[in-house]
Each structure stands twice: as C-alpha cells, then as structure tokens.
Image (cartoon, rainbow, N blue to C red):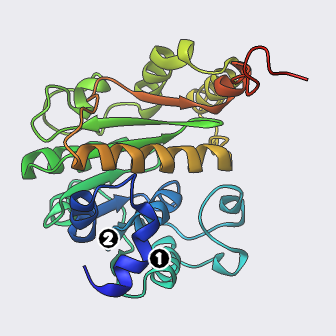
C-alpha cells in the first residue's frame, strides 16, 4: 500500500485488520447495477477497495436522486460514467472501469472475468440479467453478494462460488437453460412472501403493492428511499470485512436483514444505569 492510501484509510484501524486492508486494496470488484449499487460502490472505495468494474446500461434520471449516489448535474449522463467520476474524486489513484451495457447471457462471462467478487445490485426487473450474472460467476469460481434496498433497511445474500444454493434455486428456476419464459414478477413475489413476515409491516405493504401493480401489467418503479441504499451499503461493507478476515458469514439461502424501523421500534437501550438517574 502506498503512503497516500495508508493515510486515507488509517481511520479504519481497529475495525479493519491490517491484512484485510491489504486485501481490500488489491480486490477486484464487479458492481453490476450502478443505480442502487452506486452508494455501495462509494462505500467500497471509502473502505479501501481500489479496483472496480462498473456495469449498467442506464442514464441518471431526476427520480434517482432521492437515493442514488448522483447529483443534479449528472442527470442524462450514463450512470457508470457519473459514478466513475465520483469514485475517482474520492481516490484519484483507483482503477475504475465503466461499461455502459446491460448484463445478459451474451456478455456476463466477459464482465465477470478477472474479478474476485461480484456485487449484484441489478434492477430486480431484469431476471435474465441477474441469472446470467450468477451463472457466470459460479462458473468462474467467483463469489457473489446480492444486495437489496428494502424500505428503511437492506438485505444481503451471500453466494459462495461453491455454495449449495444458487440464484436459480432461490427463484425456483431450472438449474440450467434460458429463463426468458419466466415472469420476474412471479419470481420476486415469491421471494417477498418468504421475507414479508420479517419486515416492518409498512415496508412489506409497499413492496406487495408494487408487485401487484407489475402483475397487472402496469409500469411501476418500485418505491425506494435513501435509508435503504445506505443501509444496504453499510451491510455489504461489514460483511466483506468479515469475509476477508475469515469470519463466518451466513450464505444463501440465508438473507442477512437490517431493518432500521425495527431498531427504532425496539425502544433502544437505556443510557442511564440503574440507580444513577436524575
């Protein structure tokens, strides 16, 4: 690690072991989906990741600014280019590759090639892209973090390269072959039903409503808020440090869930020790 890098990450000390920081500096990460993944990508760079491949085919729109890591001047720009510039403004020495493409069966293997970790934050409407990404990562022996913005919270599913659970199995899809004929709405609705009982009731209701609109054939950008994007980013970075340190990390089909609403509803902890109050 060079002197400038060491200075930039020195406040990680105590939380990020030295050997983990070394690994972060050399880790090659593919971030597939740079809308929801934009906050996560910035968190990775601030954590110390310096080698990223950004993949997304969309441009920044005004309604992205409520939660994604862009500014008003970015509207109309390809997301990967705007995000690349932001990341390089944080660490000018980082190697950030921007590819303005959508992930699919024809390019997923090439996008995964050379990476040590895949971060899947592809828009959940793109079932074909998600499956192609996971298939290619598994074939290449690369682990995947699937990160989700879930209302005022986030979720993370960890897919080790040789893990027993695949994205196809999670969505009830065939073990191989095209998935063009399958409904993304039905696949994700089943997933939401499985986790619905663990969510803040308001969040579960909003997600169910969005899926119903899509099932009716109407376009529906799923409601999302900034708290979810940042919670997802924090969760993924924490999991990555634990993984690189060799600590246990629950793997799919387990979903690591962070619900900020539940943290607040739990009442918090009493900061006044018994018998010492006013």
Separation of marks 2 and 1 at Cα, in angstroms: 10 Å
Residue occupying image coordinates x 26% and y 61%: 18
Q: Circle 1 — which element?
A: helix
Q: Which residue is mark 2?
A: 52
Based on the displayed image, in which of its 4 quarters is residue 111 positioned? bottom left
Marks 2 & 1, CB-CB < 8 Å contact: yes
Whether 177 is drawn above or below 204: the answer is below
Based on the displayed image, in which of its 4 quarters is residue 147 positioned? top left
10 Å crowding of disc 2: few (<14), some (14-19), many (20+): many
Count all numbered tags in the image, as a single digit.
2
Q: Is residue 209 visible?
A: no
Residue occupying image coordinates x 74% and y 14%: 274
Q: Percent x, y for residue 41?
A: 44, 63
Would residue 93 be found to the left or right of residue 105 on screen?
right
Whether 250 is drawn above or below 61: the answer is above
Front in this rendered view, residue 251 or 183? 251
Q: Percent x, y for residue 9?
A: 41, 70
Q: Which residue is mark 1?
A: 87
Q: Percent x, y for residue 207?
A: 62, 28
Q: Percent x, y for residue 215?
A: 56, 27
Front in this rendered view, residue 56 or 42? 42
Q: Is residue 120 visible?
A: yes
Q: Which sits earlier in the primary sequence, circle 2 or circle 1?
A: 2
Q: Circle 2 — which element?
A: strand
Would residue 7 be found to the left or right of residue 151 on screen?
left
Q: Quadrant of the C terminus?
A: top right
């Amino acid at each position: 690690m060079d002197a400038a890098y060491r200075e930039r990450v020195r406040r990680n000390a105590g939380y990020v072991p030295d050997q983990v920081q070394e690994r972060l500096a050399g880790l090659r990460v593919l971030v597939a989906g740079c809308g929801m993944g934009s906050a996560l990508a910035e968190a990775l760079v601030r954590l110390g990741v310096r080698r990223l491949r950004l993949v997304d085919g969309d441009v920044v729109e005004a309604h992205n600014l409520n939660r994604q890591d862009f500014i008003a001047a970015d509207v109309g720009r390809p997301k990967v280019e705007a995000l690349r510039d932001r990341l390089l403004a944080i660490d000018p020495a980082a190697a950030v590759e921007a590819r303005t493409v959508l992930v699919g069966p024809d390019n997923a293997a090439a996008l995964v090639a050379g990476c040590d970790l895949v971060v899947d934050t592809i828009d959940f409407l793109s079932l074909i892209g998600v499956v192609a990404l996971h298939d290619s990562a598994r074939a290449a022996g690369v682990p995947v973090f699937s990160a989700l913005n879930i209302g005022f919270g986030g979720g993370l599913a960890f897919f080790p390269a040789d893990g027993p659970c695949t994205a196809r199995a999670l969505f009830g899809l065939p073990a191989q072959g095209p998935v063009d004929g399958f409904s993304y709405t039905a696949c994700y609705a089943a997933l939401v039903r499985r986790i619905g009982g663990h969510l803040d009731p308001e969040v579960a209701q909003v997600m169910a409503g969005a899926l119903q609109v899509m099932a009716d054939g109407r376009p529906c950008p799923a409601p999302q808020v900034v708290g979810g994007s940042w919670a997802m980013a924090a969760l993924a970075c924490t999991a990555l440090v634990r993984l690189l340190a060799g600590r246990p990390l629950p793997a799919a089909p387990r979903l690591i869930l962070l619900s900020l609403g539940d943290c607040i509803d739990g009442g918090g902890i009493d900061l006044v020790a018994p018998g010492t109050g006013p």
